[in-house]
Image (spheres, grey):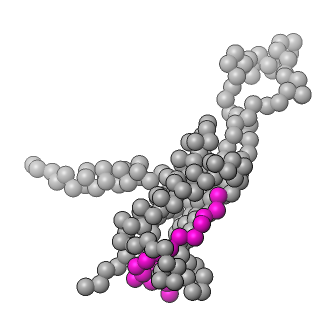
Amino acid sequence: MIRSPLPALAVLVLLTACAVNPWTVDSFEAPEADVAGKRTFVWRDGEVGAPLIKRPAVAADTQARLREAITHELKLKGYVETTDAAAADMIVSFQVSGSRRFEPSDQRRIGAPSPNEVLTPGNVRPPPASEVPREVSVRQGNVMVFAEHPGSGQLMWRGLVSAEIRTSSLERTVDKVIDAGRHIAQGFPARRTTH
């Protein structure tokens, strides 16, 4: 009996797709926009918010890399970048915002006593109330990509990734922001070509 490899192949493709895109992208297209029918786009400077804005060099690098990643994906979709705002069909921009908070760590200290030892009268005393609990840094970030109508400024398309980023360095955080922007742009409607 010969089995068809089609079901196994379908599962493999699905697993690969899940592994390739770790972000959940929320997108919206205005019904009257007909984004796929447009051809050209022009850039408006994006915004990079706190805490990255505290380091101007990092914010500038993030803007340049994010713009490059989004432009690359839009070109793959068939759109043409222009510098003439009057001739553009869309204005593309982005916004990055975020916050940083600290959460109590769920990791036990090495050598910490077991609950049985702590709860036994006369054994290990609890830590003093003045001791600061162990914490981990968590960054909550939002990356948004917009396409607007050049004449009216009305929103044509918007993609959003909102996620917690748990990284140990600012560089890794910026890499994740760029990756999120790239995946948002991959969800942009492909340009419709008419023959």
At horizontal 83% and vertical 12% (from top left) the residue drawn is 123
At horizontal 40% and vertical 73% (from top left) the residue drawn is 80
Residue 6 x, y percent position in the rendering: 21, 55
Q: Residue furthest top?
A: 122
Between 8 and 14, the one nearer to me in the picture: 14
Residue 168 falls in which quadrant of the image? Answer: top right
Kindly tell me whether residue 52 is visible in this rendering.
no
**Is residue 41 shown left or right of residue 58?**
left
Kindly tell me whether residue 60 is visible in this rendering.
yes
> Vertical placement of 143 versus 134: above or below?
below
Is residue 46 in the magenta section? yes
Q: Residue furthest left?
A: 1
At horizontal 69% and vertical 40% (from top left) the residue drawn is 137
Residue 140 x, y percent position in the rendering: 66, 51
Residue 36 x, y percent position in the rendering: 40, 79
Quarter of the C terminus within the rendering: bottom left
Is residue 185 in the magenta section? no
Residue segment shown in magenta? 32-48
Between 15 and 97, the one nearer to me in the picture: 97
Residue 76 x, y percent position in the rendering: 36, 65
**Is residue 93 shown left or right of residue 1?**
right
Between 55 and 134, the one nearer to me in the picture: 55
At horizontal 41% and vertical 51% (from top left) the residue drawn is 20
